[in-house]
Image (cartoon, rainbow, N blue to C red):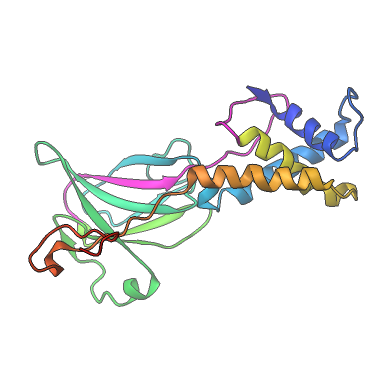
Amino acid sequence: MTTVRSIITRAVRLLGAVAQGTPLPAGDAADGLQALNSMLEAWNIDSLNIYTKNFDEYQLVPGQQVYTIGPTGNIAATPQLRPTTIDRALLKVLQSTPNIELPIKMIEDQEWSEIAVKNLTSTYCTKMYSTGDFPNLSLYLWPIPTLANKLILWTWNQVLGLQDINADLSLPPGYERAIVYNLAIELSAEYGIMASPVVQQIAIDSLAHIKRVNSTPLYLDCDPALLSPPAAFNWLTGK
């Protein structure tokens, strides 16, 4: 457990802008908080900086096609944040026991524009189009579902903006070191002080460690239907 002030103070001290044991001036604290929030906001758009993904369920209204997520969105999200990225979407069918989850294809502008009848209705939706709006993200379901099922979204978690410089901050392993040293690099231009090679290298290494832990391995697979006779394919042996 650390505090926002402690992180900013350490980053400024790594630049040599504040001496060891010297309190952080109020102006430097405010500037550091702004720089810290700016850096974390940029981290939120890189999947390898994200330590977890959210799994959220939203209640659907029969006959409603458009849903918005954000500060004033029409579906409840906690907190009310516009998702940075939606990795996948599922339809949770409540009429079955046990409930089943059907995949929803996420489509782009071209495929959405090519749908001739956009207000078509059906029991279940099979596609979802995201407009990318801000601050509320708009989602269009197609066909328009007629049953009160649930929409499941897998989204990137976000590091929320920090308002209180004296607030406690709980971070996953490795994040405090990466934030402190990379914040020092972020602040170096503002202070007009070049960070030492040691600080620069630790900033690079600490962020790389986070990215390595957060990376998702890709597995080579082959559809058994393409094999004769159908069998599991071992890419190591080619058999």
Q: Quadrant of residue 166?
A: top right
165 relative position to 14: left or right:
left
Residue 122 visible in the snapshot: yes
57 w.r.t. 89: above or below: above
Q: Nearer the viewer, residue 147 or 183?
A: 183
Residue shown at the point (57%, 40%) measured from the top left: 159
User: Could you say where residue 133 lies in the image, as x and y percent from the top left?
Assistant: 49, 59
Residue shown at the point (62%, 39%) measured from the top left: 161
Residue shown at the point (67%, 35%) measured from the top left: 177
Magenta segment, prevailing SS (helix, strand or loop): loop
User: Could you say where residue 164 lies in the image, as x and y percent from the top left?
Assistant: 69, 29
Q: Nearer the viewer, residue 55 or 210?
A: 210
Q: Residue furthest front?
A: 237
35 relative position to 231: left or right:
right
Residue 182 visible in the snapshot: no
Residue shown at the point (7%, 65%) measured from the top left: 229
Query: What's the magenta region?
Result: 145-174
Which image quarter is the N terminus in? top right
